[in-house]
Amino acid sequence: MYILGQQLINGLILGSIYGLIAIGYTMVYGIIGMINFAHGEIYMISAYLFTIFLSLVAIFGIASLPVALLVTLLLTIAFTAVYGFSVERIAYRPLRGSTRLAPLISAIGMSLVLQNYVQLAQGARDQALPPLYHGVFRFGTASEFVQITHIQAIIILVTVVSMAALTWIINRTELGRACRATQQDRTMANLLGINTDRTISLVFVIGASMAAVAGVLITFNFGSFNYFIGFVAGIKAFTAAVLGGIGSLPGAMLGGLILGLSESLFAGLVNTDYKDVFAFALLVSVLVFRPEGLLGKPAVEKI
Amino acid sequence: MKRPILSLAVAVVFGLVLVAGMPVQAKTIKIGVAGPITGPYAKFGEQLTRGANAAAAAINASGGIDGNKIEIIPGDDACDPKQARAVANRMVNEGVYAVAGHFCSSSTIPASEVYDEANILMITPASTNPQVTERGLPAVFRVCGRDDQQGDVAGDYIANVVKAKRVAIIHDKDTYGQGLADATKARLNKTHGIKEVLYEGVTRGDKDFNSLITKMKGLNVDLIYFGGLHTEAGLIVRQAAEQGLKAKFLSGDGIVTDEFPAIAGPATNGVLMTFGADPRAIPEAKSVVKQFRDGGYEPEAYTLYAYTAVQVIAEAIRSTGMSDDGEELGDYIRSHTFSTVMGKKQFDDKGDLKVSDYVVYRWYPEGSSFSYKQIQ
C-alpha cells in the first residue's frame, strides 16, 4: 500500500515539475499564439545561472543556506528574465506581423543558438550540484513509509501557488486585461491605447521568471544538468501544455500532473522501458477526442 | 577579372615552393583518435585523447616511427552512432593509417564497418561489447576486456561475496549498458541459479528515477546491478539514498570517472564496480604515470588504455614497413606480442586480448571527494 502511495507522490512531483515548465509555453501561446521553443533553453540557462550564483554567493561568505538560496533565486530570476526579454526582442518582435511559421522557425533557431552557446561557454559535460539539504517528511513506520523531501514539497507548493497567482493576474489585473485584449485583437488593442509590444515583452519576462524558478528548484532537487536538459524537459513540458490545452494555465498544471502520474504509475506498476511510450500514447488518444486539449478552448481561425 | 588570375599565380608559386620543399621531409603518419570529445561523456573523451596524445608525443620524441612523425587526427563522435559513422568517413578521407577508438560500443560498431570497407586498422581502447570483435572483421582489435568477461566477474561477486538474494538488473537500453547487464544476468541465471527480481531499462538523459526506486523498495531488492554510464548511475544512487533504499550498488567500467561521485554525492561511499586491474599499478606504467602527474593530469580509467592502443598501432606500422593496409597490420598484430605501457599484450584470432583482468573496486571517501580501490 505504501508503495502505491509513494508512486503517487513520485508522479505528483514529476507532474509539478512538468507543469512548472509548461506555464512558460502556455502563457506565450495564450497571448501571441506562438510556440516558444526556446523556453526549454531558458530553463536550462537558469540551471547554469543558479549554480554560478550559488558559488558566487558562497564566495561572498553568506553561510546561512536559506539566505544564500533566496539571494541566488532572486539573482537567477533577474538574469533569466533578461534572457527571456532579449530572446523576444531579437528573434520574435522583428517577425511580428509576418506569417505564423516565421517566428516558429526563429524559435527553433533561437533554441539551437542558446544550446550551442552554453555548450561552448560552459563545456558539454554534466555539471553536478552536491546534495546540500536533506530535510524529508516521512509518514508511517520505520520500515514502511511514504516520504517527500522538503524540496519536493516546495516544488509542488510553488507550482500550485504560481499557477493560481498567474491565473489571478490574467483575470483580475490591468496587465491581465491588456494581455487578454492583445490576444483577442492586437490591432484593436493598439488603437485603444494598449502598448501591445510592451505587454508581450512582459509576458516573456514572466515566462522566463517561471523558467528560472523551475530551473532553481529542479536543479536543487536532481543535482545534475547539462546543456541538453532544456530539450528533454521542453518536450515533456510542451506535451503537458498541449495535453491540458495550450493557452490555459490550469490546463498546463492538469496536463503536467496527468503526464507525470501516468509516467510514474506505468513505470512503477508495469515497466520502466515503456513509460514514455505510454505517456505519449495517452497524449495521442486525448488529442484524437479533444484536439484542443483537456481544458483548451476550441480554436477559432482568424479571418 | 584581374584578381582571380593574380591569386591563381600566387597559389601556383606557393605550390611550387611547397613541392620543392617536400622531398627532404619525412612522411607524417596520421593516426585517428575518435571518441566523445564533447557531450555528456566528454570526460571519457578526455581520457582517450590525453592517453593517445601522450603516446604519440613519446614516440615522436624518440624519433617517431623510423623517422616518420605521428600526427594525431582527433574525431568527435559524442557517443552518437550516426556521428560516429560521419567521423569514420572523415578519417578515411584524411588518409589515416589506423584509428585508436572509438569509445562507446554503440559508436565503435557502426564506425568499424566504415573502417572495414576502407581496410583501415582500428583498435578500441574501451569498447567492451562482445559484438565489437564477434563479427569477424579482420582489422578490429581492442586493448580492453569484454562485457561477457566483465559480467562473469560481476555475477560471481554478487553470488559468492555479496551473497545477494534479491537482485535488480537495470540497464540504459544502449549497446554497452544492456550488453553488460545481459552478460551479468546470464552468469547469475546459468552458473549460480539466481533469478533476478527485476530486469528493466531506463532512458539515457532522464533525471527522475524515483518510480523505479520505489518499485525496487517494494521488491526488497538487496543489490542493484546497473549496466550503463555514470550520469544515470549517479542519479540512481543519489535518489535511492534519498528514498532510504538500502541496497548495494554494483556497476561496470562505465562509472569509472570522478564525475560519478560529483553527481551521486555522499551515497557514493560503498558503491562497487568492475574494471580492469588498475593499469596505474603495472610496473611498466610507472614512468608514464609520473609524467602525466607531473603534467597535472591523473591518468585515470582509460587514459593508459588509449596510450597502449597507440603503442600497438605504431609498433605494427613500424614492423610492416609503414603499411596502411588494415589486413596486413591485423595479421601482424595477431601473430606477435607487444610490450606496452600496460605490460605484454597478445591478441587472439578475434582481436580480443588473450588475458583479461577484471576485478571489483569499491568507492570510498577520500578528503572532500571520493576515490576507488581494488577489493578483489
Image: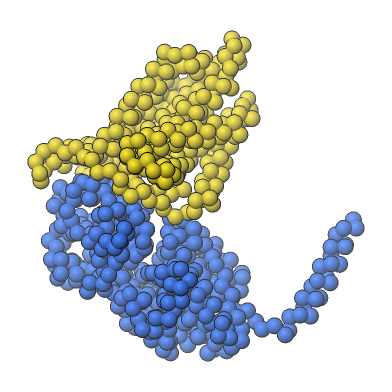
Question: How far across and how far down the image is residue A283, in percent?
Answer: 36, 35
**Residue A296 image-quadrant placement:** top left
Residue depicted at x 26% and y 48%:
B239
**Residue A125 image-quadrant placement:** bottom left
Residue depicted at x 22% and y 50%:
B241
Question: How far across and how far down the image is residue B9, in percent?
Answer: 86, 67
Nearer to us in this view, B14 or A48: A48
Measured along the vertical axis of the image, is residue B338 above or below residue B204? Answer: below
Q: In this view, does B18 lie to the left or right of B95?
A: right
Question: How far across and how far down the image is residue B347, in percent?
Answer: 39, 83
Nearer to us in this view, A212 or B92: A212
Q: In this view, does B355 lie to the left or right of B330?
A: left
State the colouring used for the structure image. by chain
Q: In which quarter of the image is the N terminus of chain B?
A: bottom right
Question: How far across and how far down the image is residue A255, in percent?
Answer: 35, 30
Measured along the vertical axis of the image, is residue A77 above or below residue A167? Answer: below
Q: In which quarter of the image is the C terminus of chain B?
A: bottom left
Q: Which chain is yellow?
A: A
Nearer to us in this view, B327 or A172: A172
The extreme right residue here reads B2
Measured along the vertical axis of the image, is residue B166 above or below residue B352? Answer: above
Number of numbered labels in the structure image: 0
Residue depicted at x 23% and y 50%:
B240
Visible residue check, residue B358? yes
The extreme top residue here reads A192
Nearer to us in this view, B9 or A165: A165
Residue depicted at x 88% and y 62%:
B5
Image colour assigned to chain B: blue
Visible residue check, residue A285? no
